[in-house]
Image: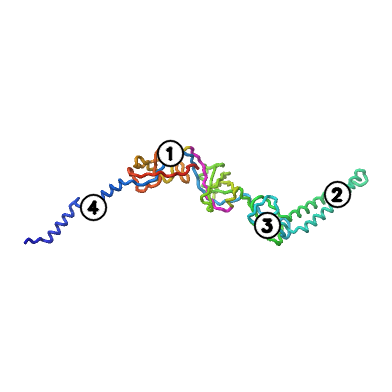
Amino acid sequence: MKVTNPLLAVLAIAATAAIPGCGTGEASQADADDVSAATPVPVEVALPERADIFATYLATTTIESDRDAPVLARVRGEVVELLVEEGDVVEAGQVLARLDGERLRLEMLSAKAKLEKTRKEFARTEDLADRGLVSVAMHDDLKYDLAALQAAYDLAKLNYEYSRIRATISGVVSSRDIKLGQNIEPQSVAFRITDTRELIAYLQIPQSELAKFTAGHSASLRVDSMPDTDFPATIARISPTIDTRNGTFRATALIENADGYLVPGMFARFMIAYEKHENALVVPQQAVLFEDEVASVYVVTDGEVSRRRVQTGVTNEQHIEILSGLSDDDEIVVVGHSGLRDGSKVLASQIKTNSYTG
């Protein structure tokens, strides 16, 4: 009976395992790579479009009203009637509240009586003066007295009229600062009125951007209360000076607000369109890949992709202008870049794109 040396058996097994190409691991990995390369990658594609596109600048600030005025009491008195409340729309000259004006009314009537008495006396002496029956000095004194009494009456009448507190501008009552029965003094703030039909915003923009902006540029803004709504605005004025404290210049934007959706104090995000490129070739931003400041896109041809370098131009909030490297009929990958490389097989489906303008 032949006895096998255990040590020799172990060495023989180890030598067999070390022979190259005898295992199945490498073959299995190669097969997996081949299968992966042959499996189409699902992507969403789109064609470039021709449209007008604007270069834009983003800025944030708080909306204000350029027509905001306190309504002051002109005379002393007790508040006996309130005719409006906060939020009411008023017109310039409308009565907002009424003070107890009885004393002022009586003072006006007294001044009126004195005026009428002197006016009749002056009329009598004027006829006598024409005939030389009264002195010229007496006639002149009455004339001056009549003018003084007329002024006193006008002043008394004005003070009585001031017992009715009136709106100084048209707009919305933004605050009521008096109460019924309260005794107020002259120059006390009774109401505040804000005209919100046109609002204003002051944008502080870095001085390096000054050459890009001129009055008349269009803009749009969004606020947190309506994040999906764009409100139009116009750059009305550009300050010609630089603020040395922060190196910025001021651009003033006017906002039409006839519907009243916006109110002063809202924080807004502005997008200013300062340069228009007409009939530009544009693609969605997510279609363009940037690596080491080099832009490229994946172009789909016969179910395969190739990476192509492009030159980009104007970029706005959603889209990029393509200056070179792409034609109108090149189908590009918009969604699904992960795992793609030159020659990758793809399963393409069309993506619905939004409007590129603006």
Q: What amino acid does circle 1 point to? A: Leu
Residue behind mark 4 = 25
Three-letter code for the amino acid on which mark 4 is drawn: Gly
Q: Are marks 4 and 3 in contact (CB under 8 Å)?
A: no
Decide: is 40 above or below 81: above
What is the residue that sits farthest to the left in this orientation?
1
Picture coordinates of residue 327, whole percent (x, y): 41, 37
Specify start and end residues of the magenta stretch as a single range.
264-278
254 relative position to 111: left or right: left
Label 2: how many Cα within 10 Å (few below 14, some 14–19, many 20+): some
Give the image quarter of residue 4: bottom left
Residue of label 1: 323
Marks 1 and 3: in contact by CB < 8 Å?
no
In 3D space, how far apart are the residues under numbered discs 1 and 2 (Cα atoms)?
A: 87 Å
Q: Front-most of 272 and 326?
A: 326
State left or right for residue 41 relative to residue 247.
left
Query: Secondary structure beneath disc 2?
Result: helix
Relative to residue 90, is residue 225 drawn left or right?
A: left
Quarter residue 107 falls in = bottom right
Q: Earlier in the sequence, mark 1 or mark 2?
A: 2
Position of residue 97 measured from the top left corner of the image (x, y, whole percent): 70, 56
In the rendered image, residue 269 lying in the magenta stretch gets the answer yes
Label 3 vs 2, first from the N-terminus: 2
Q: Is residue 149 left or right of residue 312?
A: right
The residue positioned 47% from the left and 39% from the top of the image is 51
